Image: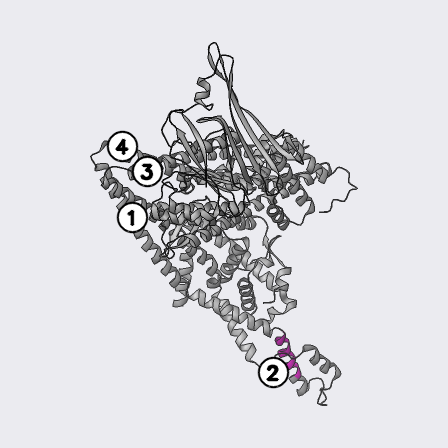
Amino acid sequence: MRIQSIELENFRQYRGKVLVELGCDQKKNINVIQGVNGAGKTNMLNAIEWCLYDKEGYLEKYSGKKQPIINDAELKELKEGEKATAKVTLRLIDSGGRQTVFERQISARRDKDGITFDGESEAHAYMRIKQDMVELTEREFTVNRILPYGVRSFFFFDGERLDEFFKEEKSSVVRDAILDVSQLSLLEKAIEHLERTISSMRGKIKGDSPKIEDIQEAIREVEGGRENYRQQKRNKEEELSGIRAQLSEIGEKLMGSNEPLVRELQRRRETLSARLKELDETLQDNETETSDRVVERGPAIYATDAIRFALQQIDVRAKKGDIPPKIRETFIRELLDKGECICGTKIRHDSVPRKRIMGLLERAKISEIYEEMVELKYALDPMLKAAGSFTKEQDRLRAEIAGLQRQKSEAQTEQREIETRLKGINVEEITNLEFTRKALEKNEDELIGRIGILGEKIENATRKLQELERELAKELSRSERFKIANQRLELGGDTLTVLARAKEKLVDETRATIEKKTEDYFLNLIWKKDTYADIKIDDDYNISVINRIGSECLGTLSAGERQVLALSFLAALREVSGFDAPVVIDTPLGRISKEPRENIAELLPNFLEHTQVTLFMTDEEYTSQVRTKLAQRIGREYELIYDEERSQTQVKTLG
Amino acid sequence: MDRKRLDRYDFAVESGEKHSRVKRLKEEKLSPFRDMTMKDVFIYAMAIGYERGKKVPLKRRTGVIPGNALRDEDYALVKAIGISQRKDVDILFEKKEKELFKIAEEYANGGIDMLFYQVFGEDPGDPDRKMEQALRDLMAKKRKG
Amino acid sequence: MSRLESVSGRILNEIASQTRNKAVRHLATEILRFEMENWKKERVHFTEHFEQLISQACPEDQRRDDSS
């Protein structure tokens, strides 16, 4: 999907009609719109958002007054009885050549008493069907199919806020967006609805025995309780998100402090935090390993005597007799039946030859299981060894755990020292921030604990429900009357299980794929080739970057490197979701210093190869070097020039 | 390893309290088996039952552990215990398979209560640690005796 | 063009790999299709529609083949 053109009419500082046509070429897929801050770049992005979603989300970088949507000058020159209208038209075209047009407008009238604005804007959508432009009745539905609101930050975004993807409090936003775009949220909806349907169906069954009634009552109770817990958990999670945002803000304030000591201490503290997180994870892994080894080796340890005995028996039996292992039992039986050996010797009852042959028979039988015995020996030998080395391996791991705990303890002590030092700084603001931070952290811990407990309660309720449902099914199956009802409940239940399992598997698969692709992009394109080794994305979509020596180093990435990481993540998301929206980035290189800026400009096309890209840049970003790097891929170039006198922006075509 | 016979069989647990203990060992958050399967509980119980010499016939069966859930090592252990119990390798013959599996089931049946006590009993400590300590004690005892 | 026009193949494949039960597969697919189409619209309430789908799969008429 590509943007063919953006047309603004009397939208904010754009007076009259302004048309910006964008390149739709596969090869020349990058469009550049440059202008100083305040010239109108951000408002053009706002225009797109307003047109599609009736919202404007982008911060004004130039701190002017917030203007009404309709152009100021237009409004001023209105005569009584006249109307002014602001309108934005977005023309899109898909890979099949089908054109879609989105329009939104809002008007104002001047009457005796002043200017009256329309309460609401008016929106339309059209699609080209053959030669005609046909109006679409389900505009909102169409918008959300092509450019869903929930995932807009994956295609229209503020370049300076790209690393929001890495903030802990935003990770759930990322997770939800991914679920949305890969249709997994559809699965979630389906599961939720099916659950409620089954509950409703079950409730409608009028049992003819008090036992059935009792079970149904119990089910209702547990379901109600579980729903309650779910709601509580959602609330607490939101609270937690808010607290984390606040903590993040405080961290930023401290990092941005005028006092160099404060900045240093905060930076050190953040490094320690990352280190502690890493240590906790490793500790957790090690603890799990010790526990798993107990379950794994325990049986062989308890059964050591049996293993030894079995091995011994196998040795003895296999050595007994030196016949080749594969003598057939049937062959020997035939000999005995015939009463005569192949060499002609008669085999009479109780004779020596017969005894010999019976012995062979015994060994032949053993030969039937000879292979099995050999395989068994090969299986048991290592088990015995592993059983023997159990204590040694556990001790080693325990020593490692102790070492890690010591490191953890040291880091925590240092953190406390930093806290004390910061509190002791004779600047009121810093002391206040520290106290607030401490209180928030305590709050955070409590919430995490409570959310954990609620999670467990929900799991217990679900298990209890499954038990009750089994009981109910059993009771219902006693009576012919409920046979059909039972079948239906069973079908519903089985389908619910399938959907739930599918969702679990796909959510994890999606996460793993995004993790791999982000890593591929990042490691491939970052200029410091030997520094970084790994990218990890956990279930909550928190991203970590691991360096060559195995430490987490997201916090130490430079602004430029973070930008590359963010772009890698974005490219991975888009690839995995199969989402084909055009990309518009406001100030992609804003926070980046000179050299990395050129690197990124060079890399940009690699991230967004088959996509139409529109970049809004300041003249500081769009240097001649950057321009050179992008030259081959540039479709259209424009400059926005703000006319101070007339308070309006004009669009000038370049190139 | 030839698993045809194993994959055809479903290992049973005694229905009633033993069955519910197996389930609790698998399901409870504190249990070291929480991330494992019923099969792991079964094999562990079988091994403990063997070590203590507690082979208890099942009063009523409920089939909960499919044979194909056992790994090759688990099957090897079942065979070793069978051979040790019968004092002969002939338990490995195909026609004796039911007997082999029955031995496994009965030792598991005997060991389940002891395993349950080890994990959920009143002795102080973390279930993981308690189980590990039991193993260490056992190994120490064997070295001495 | 847009992945949001039909239920993704990935999801359908995963469902198919989870169960061989035709009735379950059919119900799961129909439910997802419904969710797809009713996203944002919520015209037909899901309970009615889902109950209908389930009833169709397990009808009253006993002579119908209930095999799964």
Give the image location of residue A287, x and y in percent: 40, 53
| Figure quadrant of the N terminus of chain A | top right
Q: Nearer the viewer, mark 1 or mark 4?
A: 4
Tell me the SS state at disc 4: helix
The residue under label 2 is which amino acid type?
Ile
> Can the viewer see residue A420 in this picture?
no
The residue under label 4 is which amino acid type?
Asn
Give the image location of residue A73, x and y in percent: 43, 21
Nearer-N-terminus badge (3/2): 3
Tell me the SS state at disc 2: loop
Give the image location of residue A16, x and y in percent: 49, 25
Q: Which residues make up the magenta segment?
A: A357-368
The residue under label 3 is which amino acid type?
Glu
Question: Is residue B20 shown above or below A307?
Answer: above
Report if residue A365 lies within the magenta region: yes
Between the C-alphas of marks 3 and 1, the distance is: 21 Å
Report if residue A271 lies within the magenta region: no
Q: Mark 2 points at which residue?
A: A323
* Cβ–Cβ under 8 Å for marks 3 and 2: no
Q: Do dots 2 and 1 share one subunit?
A: yes
Between the C-alphas of marks 2 and 1, the distance is: 69 Å
User: Chain letter of disc 2?
Assistant: A
Tell me the SS state at disc 3: helix
Which disc, if any, is residue A411?
A: 1
Give the image location of residue A222, x and y in percent: 55, 35
User: Chain letter of disc 4?
Assistant: A
A83 and A435: which one is in front?
Answer: A83
Q: Do dots 1 and 4 share one subunit?
A: yes
Nearer-N-terminus badge (3/4): 3
Q: Nearer the viewer, mark 3 or mark 2?
A: 3
Which disc, if any, is residue A432?
A: 4
Question: Is residue B61 shown above or below A585?
Answer: below
